[in-house]
């Protein structure tokens, strides 16, 4: 039987290992399936290797949404936003999480394991997953991002 729980792909490097484990457990306790592309241990790993896998899954449509984590969240954001169709948003609080969905239709959430308290990170993930895109004028702006992407990013 195929589960009707939404699948979320996640991934972290060593800089956010503990946070990743916390977020993964929290998602699994809720209505989500999780596919974790992190290495199986918290040993050092180059974040682009992990970010690439998660971003590719969102970019090719295998999954709708992904969550990436590294020390600051910056490296993973840079990697993910190289992929066509990926709109990765580095969020530090509930406000940026909500805005990244309502205004930017972000499909990858990025978190900094050395930046965020774990309870705040869980709140950010919850808001991000539950907030809908507001459309209207924001849809026009997201379409403009897609045009820029088509003109400048090779598929
Ligand atoms: C790893 O030390 C660290 O550079 C990485 O987790 C991330 O913060 C990069 O942007």
Image (spheres, rainbow, N blue to C red):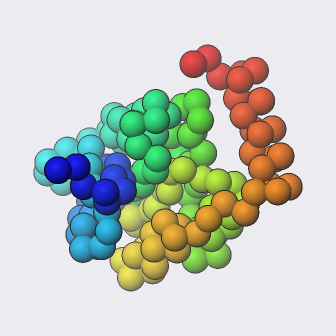
* Vertical placement of residue 70 versus 128, above or below: above
Outermost residue, top direction? 154
Residue lying at 71% horizontally and 23% vertically, measured from the top left: 150
73 left or right, relative to 142: left
Q: Could you tell whether 79 is left or right of 140 in the image?
A: left
Tell which residue pokes out farthest to the front in this image: 1
Image height check: is 10 above or below 62? below
Residue 130 x, y percent position in the rendering: 52, 70
Query: In the drawing, does residue 48 fall left or right of residue 39?
Result: right
Figure check: 50 above or below 119: above
Q: Quadrant of residue 17?
A: bottom left
Kindly identify the residue that appears in the image at 81 percent across and 47 percent down.
141
- Residue at image point 35% right, 35% down: 53
Q: Residue furthest bottom?
A: 119
Residue 42 to residue 59: above or below: below
Residue occupying the point 75% across, 45% down: 142
Residue 87 x, y percent position in the rendering: 60, 45
- The answer to whether residue 44 is left or right of residue 153 is left
Indicate the position of residue 1 as horizontal and vertical percent values.
Answer: 17, 50
């Amino acid at each position: 039987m195929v589960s009707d729980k939404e699948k979320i792909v996640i991934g972290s490097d060593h800089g956010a290992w503990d946070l990743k484990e916390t977020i993964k457990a929290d998602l699994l306790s809720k209505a989500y399936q999780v596919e974790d592309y992190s290495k199986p241990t918290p040993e050092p790993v180059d974040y682009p290797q992990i970010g690439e896998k998660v971003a590719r899954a969102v970019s090719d449509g295998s999954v709708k949404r992904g969550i990436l984590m590294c020390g600051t969240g910056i490296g993973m954001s840079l990697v993910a936003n190289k992929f066509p169709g990926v709109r990765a948003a580095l969020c530090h609080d509930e406000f940026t999480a909500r805005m990244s969905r309502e205004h930017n239709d972000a499909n990858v959430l990025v978190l900094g394991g050395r930046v965020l308290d774990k309870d705040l990170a869980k709140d950010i993930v919850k808001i991000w997953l539950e907030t809908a895109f507001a459309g209207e004028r924001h849809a026009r702006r997201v379409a403009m991002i897609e045009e820029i992407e088509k003109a400048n990013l090779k598929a």
